[in-house]
Amino acid sequence: MLFTFALLASLVSMPNDMIPAALARYENVASYQTTLRVSHGRSNDIIKYFYKKPGFIRMEFVTPHKGALLLYDPTTKRVRLQPFGNTKAFSLTLKPDNPLVKSPSGHRVDESDIGTLLGRVLALQKQGQTTAAGEEHVGGKSTVLVNVEGKQGFTLDGTNRFLLNLDAATLLPVQVRTYDGAGRLRETVLMDDLEIDIPFDEQFFKP
């Protein structure tokens, strides 16, 4: 507990180092699983998300499209969409930029992992400023609240500001809020029950 508070205090004192530090931590993560709770306008999605480097992805939809299964294989660079879960009837094999498998905010399946997210935040940070906004409890966890905002209205794919809650112990994001150039909330992503370094078999990510 004391270590966590000391880490949090040191990070708050040097906000520009937080995102590179989070990326460095993520580089040592081999796999993870979480429940994504995504709010985008009137859309509210709940997705069980599984990831294994170098890029295997499995998404099990809870709401909407309950039971649908989406798999991404980085070796073939193809997405497998199975509308009825493990049943292969009516399944589709698609490119990751196909609109059928993009999120409401336009994110591609193959660019949906934590590493890609932190990379985008770092890119905006280089064109803006970063401030630490103290501590905030999210999902029962102590988090460092970090604000990254593009200068003079600069946007990255329509995003001018990231507001991140980084886990004080792991530095991995617990919650991410994105805003457009007018300050409007675009999307909120909450990562519930994040677990890292799960020993997934590669067959878990196969049709």
Image (cartoon, rainbow, N blue to C red):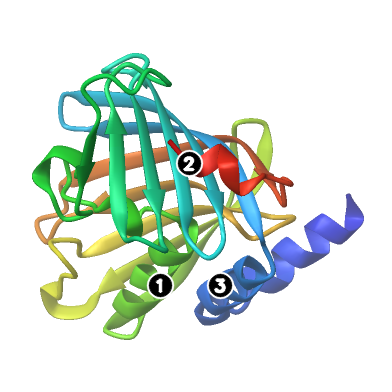
User: Hey, which residue is sitting farthest bottom in the picture?
Assistant: 126
Q: Residue at x 16, y 24 (%)?
A: 42
Residues marked 3 and 1 touching at CB (< 8 Å): yes
Is disc 2 placed on a helix, strand or loop? loop
Q: Which residue is mark 3?
A: 23
109, above or below 11, in the image: above
Please tell me in which quadrant of the rendered image residue 74 appears.
bottom left
First reached walking from the N terminus: tag 3 or tag 1:
3
- Nearest the viewer among 150 and 156 is 156
Within-10-Å neighbours for mark 1: few <14, some 14–19, many 20+ = some
Q: Amino acid at mark 1?
A: Gly
- Nearest the viewer among 66 and 79 is 79
Please tell me in which quadrant of the rendered image residue 172 appears.
bottom right
Q: Amino acid at mark 2?
A: Lys
1, above or below 64, in the image: below
Horizontal side, residue 139 vs residue 56: left or right: right
First reached walking from the N terminus: tag 1 or tag 2:
1
Query: What is the C-alpha distance between the residues marked 3 and 2?
Result: 28 Å
- Nearest the viewer among 76 and 20 is 76
Q: Residue at x 62, y 76 (%)?
A: 24
Q: Which residue is mark 2?
A: 206
Residue 16 location (% of width, % of height): 50, 81
47, above or below 18, in the image: above
Residues marked 1 and 2 touching at CB (< 8 Å): no
Q: Residue at x 48, y 53 (%)?
A: 56
